[in-house]
Amino acid sequence: MRVVIYGCGQVGLKIADALSRQNHKVTMIDRDPDTFRKLETAIPGCLFVVGDAIDQDVLRKAEIEQADLFLALTGEDNANLFAAQAAQTLFNVRRVLARVADPTRAQAFAELGLTAICSTDLIAAAVKEKIGLSTPGPAAEKAGRKPAGKVAK
């Protein structure tokens, strides 16, 4: 599988490393050339492209036309949105996934037909699970308890 990843932070690097170890062809895009100098030996066989993935020329250098999967994993919701839209609509990448921090924006991404992973929702769910919180269902509501996450009026 050919994968293009936008964003060389911790998330992008972990995904790129895992894909590379499974012999997938990985290309990473990041704006910071110093990032790649540090990574060239860390992920063998990975192609690195310096630039912004909202730029069509940068996406072409990253061989987006051959990509089976595009991952927008920067820490910037808007950059991820624009890059994911470009991959999906301009280059017809079959699978596109964007990282998003703002749950409201995650909904907007979905309305645009993009698959989004909302880090805020994932972390909140993990914390609730670790501390033993669960969202009450209809039976708890009938018993008079307010559902978690709703504000009483």
Image: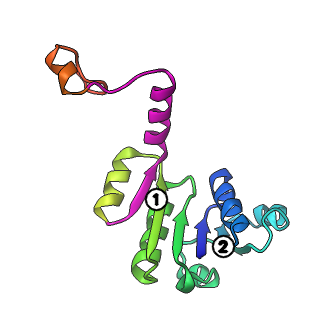
Q: Is residue 127 visible?
A: yes
Name the residue at 85% across, 66% down.
41
Return the x and y of residue 149 as percentages of the image width and height: 31, 27
Please tell me which residue is depicted at 25% across the width and 23% down the height of the picture: 147
Callout in the foreground (2, 1):
2
Relative horizontal placement of residue 57, taking residue 151 as reference (left or right)? right
Residue 57, how many percent across, how many down? 58, 84
Residue toward you, 44 or 100 = 44
Residue 148 lies in what quarter of the image?
Answer: top left
Left or right of 15, for residue 124? left
Q: Determine if the magenta segment contains residue 97.
A: no
C-alpha span from label 2 to label 1: 28 Å
Q: Which mark is residue 78?
A: 1
Judge left or right: residue 45 versus residue 26: right
How busy is the neighbourhood of tag 2: few (under 14 within 10 Å), some, or many (20 plus)?
A: some
At a point 31% along the width and 65% down the height, the residue shown is 112
Residue at the spot 44% in from the left edge and 34% down from the top edge? 125
Is residue 133 highlighted in magenta? yes
Q: Give the magenta range.
A: 113-136
Q: Quadrant location of the C terminus? A: top left
Please give the residue where the numbered disc 2 appears in the rendered image.
24
- Image mark count: 2
**Regarding mark 2 in the picture, which secondary structure is present there?**
loop
Q: Residue furthest left?
A: 142
> Hey, what amino acid is under mark 2?
His
